[in-house]
Image: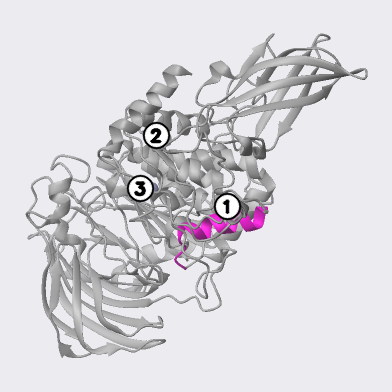
Amino acid sequence: MKRLELLAFLAAAGCAAQHPPVLTPVRIDTTRSAAATGATSPPVPVRTATGVRTVATDPLSRVDRMEWQGPNMFRSGSGTPGPEYWQQRADYTIAATLDTARQRVSGAVTIRYTNNSPDSLRFVWLQLDQNLYRPGSKGSMLFPADSRWGVRGFRGGYEIDGLQANGRAAVMHVDDTMGRIDLEQAVAPRGGRLTITMNFAFRVPEHGSDRMGRDGTLYEIAQWYPRMAVYDDIRGWNTDPYLGQGEFYLEYGDFEYAITAPAGYTIAGSGVLQNPTEVLTVAQRERLARAARSDSAVAIITNEEARATPVAGTKTWHFRAQNVRDVAWAGAPDFRWDAANANGVLAQAYYQLAKAGKAWEQGAEQTAWTIRNYSELFFKYPYPQATSVAGPVGGMEYPMFVMVHYGNPLDDPRSIFGTINHEHGHEWFPMVVGSNERRYAWQDEGFNTYINAFALERRTPGTLPYPGYVTNWRQTVDNHVDAPLMTPPDQIDARALGALGYRKPAAVLLALRDNVVGRTTFDRAFREYTQRWAFKHPSPADFFRTIENVSGMDLGWYWRAFWYSTDVLDIGIDNVGMRQQEGQNYAVVALRRYTSVPFPVRLRLLFRDNTTEDVALPVEIWSGGDRYEAVLAVKGAVIGARLWPEGPVPDWNPTNDAWGAPVPGVTTPAPATSGGLSGEIGARAAP
Ligand SMILES: [Zn+2]
């Protein structure tokens, strides 16, 4: 325990200098304690090296709800979109050309923007992501040039000309990866329209921060056209720049886009191909029709056909994607292309066999599997197709389209499944549930990693993702790179992003489901959140409030512990004593909470006759402080006791979890998802 306290202290001390807590608690509601004392401000939290520490106070009666905005007509106190919820809309028409000789993309974009907000907009902001590759950009200075997000010395950025707003010449004020257009006439509230047109061009980086790029003749193109920044009711314009590590926040709309590429190229992209008769052969179109009815993969371009034979001229591929936040695409002259039906969705894989390896011959089947399974578990996949492309990008998601790394040298299909499963999981978070990824990685990567656990256990029964999630979280504490989950991802130590963006949130959601809310209710609540906020912009508070309202629980203590602080759970048994009164035996179990984190306690008692009895104590036992004496009527003398007898709770220190004689229980962590998800929304997949 001491060692662990010390570790926790060191960890936070290590990160405190670099990562001060960003979110200041602000009181927005009142409770009994504030009312009773007449206090006008919440109890001053004791700030320690481990964050907001409340050991000595009452962690359950805190009145501040962190930075949650007050309920209003846009977002209700129950976590639903309010009666006057609004959201902007951005529809795009793009015509672009891929010049493989000059490694450039150039094109023209028309953005039709609808201002549904109650505000007049005298200026608008756009995202100019390619400016990350301008020499001296903020991101290129922040992330080491040779790192995953680094620009590797590449010199690029946007060239933009011909900018017009509503048909009049306009000027863009460019600040790094953001651009502001001042408007001659404000865009009217509640339905006002603005049309922006411009030409854009950029050189394609070889290593596009692991989110786009090229490898020889293969191009994976994303963050490629100027995109509208999100204007919302929480912050107005969301102008956090693109630095590399933080992802995206985008408006929904419909896209028409056309890619002109060398005639020998095959283009894969978000949306549905609109001109198959112009770009595909008769045989390819016939095979596609067959694939749409086939549960096993059909080769659209066979191995024999996937040869880069130079063809003169160009071809234009025309795609349409509806109700999406973005579009991305890829092109190569020698793609193999497989497709299969996944409950009416066309699941596709594009890969250059020599680089991708034979593992990718399973790519279409794996894609189909993920789409079918997440549709059954969480929310029906709303789009007509899902594409996986093999390439140098390690794993990146876009609507209907994901980039996945090449297979391993052993051609093991399992070498790509984890990433295909993860990237397509993103079709639900954040493609359908459009949260602000640039500020809250946990609502995107964390939720996705949470749902990945169910898919992984379904795909390979016996897989236990949960212990690995906790181990990774522990590494950030041990390596002094921990930070609260609420930390914007660009401010998370790059070494901790995998844990804090992905695995800790997944672990604490699984722990919440198993130990606090209960599986059936949590599954109900999580699906409610997904449905409420599909194609919308949920804030963290909308998630917290939805879980609390469906479960009927005030979980402020849980969010505070695991989202807003870096403290860890450590509850132990100090002692077990016996007493007798009027012939009845009572066990007195002295429990201690060593950190600021309260938690409901599950306890197993062992008696002399080798029988056991389980006791569940609610989290409210900690409202009086960090000690609790449970007085329990029992049948006889207790000779042993242990915490968490049924397995995994993220208790940091197991050495103080038992007292007396050894008590039987689960010693290896059971899968937190064991038993699957309750009340699946569709039929189970065939095994
Ligand atoms: Zn991800």
Residue displayed at 28% across by 39% down = 493
Relative image position of residue 253 (x, y in whole percent): 39, 74
Q: Mark 1 or mark 2, which is nearer to you?
A: 1
Q: Quadrant of residue 418?
A: top left
Residue displayed at 37% across by 27% down = 9
Label 1 SS: helix
For residue 320, say whether it is visible: yes
Q: Quadrant of the C terminus?
A: top right
10 Å crowding of disc 3: few (<14), some (14-19), many (20+): many
The residue identified by callout 3 is 487
Residue displayed at 55% across by 49% down = 556
Label 2 SS: loop
Q: Which one is nearer the viewer's eye here, 648 or 31?
A: 31
Separation of marks 1 and 3 at Cα, in angstroms? 33 Å
10 Å crowding of disc 1: few (<14), some (14-19), many (20+): few
Q: Which mark is residue 50?
A: 2
The residue identified by callout 1 is 37
